[in-house]
Image (spheres, rainbow, N blue to C red):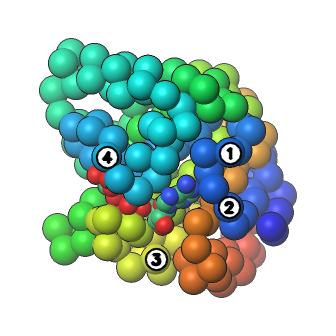
Amino acid sequence: METVKCGRYYISIVKGDITGFRVDAIVNAANKFLRHGGGVAGAILKRGGPIIQIESDKIIRERGPLNVGDAVYTPAGNLEAKIVIHTVGPIYGEGGEYKKIYTAVMNSLTLADELGMRSIAFPAISTGVYKVPPKVSAEAMLSAVIDYSKHAINIEHVYIVLYTDDIYKVFKDVFHGLITQCL
Ligand code: AR6
């Protein structure tokens, strides 16, 4: 784990399973329909319980499918978190992947901050089923986390939780390249 003070909060790059994380808000890499099947979404649902899918279905019934970059929240069920923030990343090849991931992270941070969350954990958005190269996701995610650190009100700590060694290494390397923006 690596932790750096950046603007108004701490940023940590961590290797691990996000579903075991004790933070106020866990972010899910969702699809537009909030059908939490595989990947990190499946793991969150399995450990958090059916309430997460039930509340997600309610959101879709009320407002229809989400757009890429949107962020909404549900309770966290049995997870050790207060809420799950569901954000939709792009599918590789659809275009504008960097900007869409940047927006998804910005919207998630803004929502968490508005809800008074003090800590938040993100997985590597779009790097699994959606096949975006980890370097693109890392550059977009970490730029958004660094940019938002200048405006944060309630958030004190942002964790980026990487599941595999390869993706952990990519995120660490990209973070080292961007860290000067924190000073
Ligand atoms: N903790 C942290 N990271 C994880 C975990 C975990 N427990 N499990 C997987 N990852 P993905 P996407 C990593 O596929 O690419 C789903 O079916 C994984 O190694 O979960 O945005 C949704 O419902 C990868 O690096 O999300 C959508 O339909 C990262 O999480 C679609 O996949 C993201 O992989 C979204 O695809």
Q: Which mark is residue 20?
A: 1
Residue 68 in picture, x, y percent from top left = 26, 49
| Vertical position of residue 73 compared to residue 129: above or below | above
Q: CA distance from mark 3 to mark 2?
A: 16 Å
Looking at the image, is mark 3 or mark 2 earlier in the sequence? 2
- Check disc 2 and give the amino acid type: Gly
Looking at the image, is mark 4 or mark 3 earlier in the sequence? 4
- Check disc 4 and give the amino acid type: Gly
CB at disc 2 and ligand 1 closer than 8 Å: yes
Q: CA distance from mark 3 to mark 1?
A: 22 Å
- Check disc 3 and give the amino acid type: Pro
Provide the secondary structure element on which disc 2 rests. Answer: loop
Looking at the image, is mark 3 or mark 1 earlier in the sequence? 1
| Vertical position of residue 168 compared to residue 108: above or below | below
Between label 3 and label 1, give the one nearer the viewer: 1
Give the residue displayed 34% in from the left and 73% down from the top. Answer: 132
Query: Is label 3 in contact with label 2 (beta carbons under 8 Å)?
Result: no
Lateral position of residue 70 relative to residue 28, left or right: left
Splitting the image into 4 quarters, where does residue 161 fall? bottom right
Provide the secondary structure element on which disc 1 rests. Answer: helix
| Residue marked by disc 3 | 134
CB at disc 3 and ligand 1 closer than 8 Å: yes
| Residue marked by disc 2 | 16
Query: Is label 2 in contact with label 1 (beta carbons under 8 Å)?
Result: yes
Residue 162 in picture, x, y percent from top left = 60, 65
Give the residue displayed 76% in from the left and 45% down from the top. Answer: 157
| Residue marked by disc 4 | 37
Looking at the image, is mark 4 or mark 1 earlier in the sequence? 1
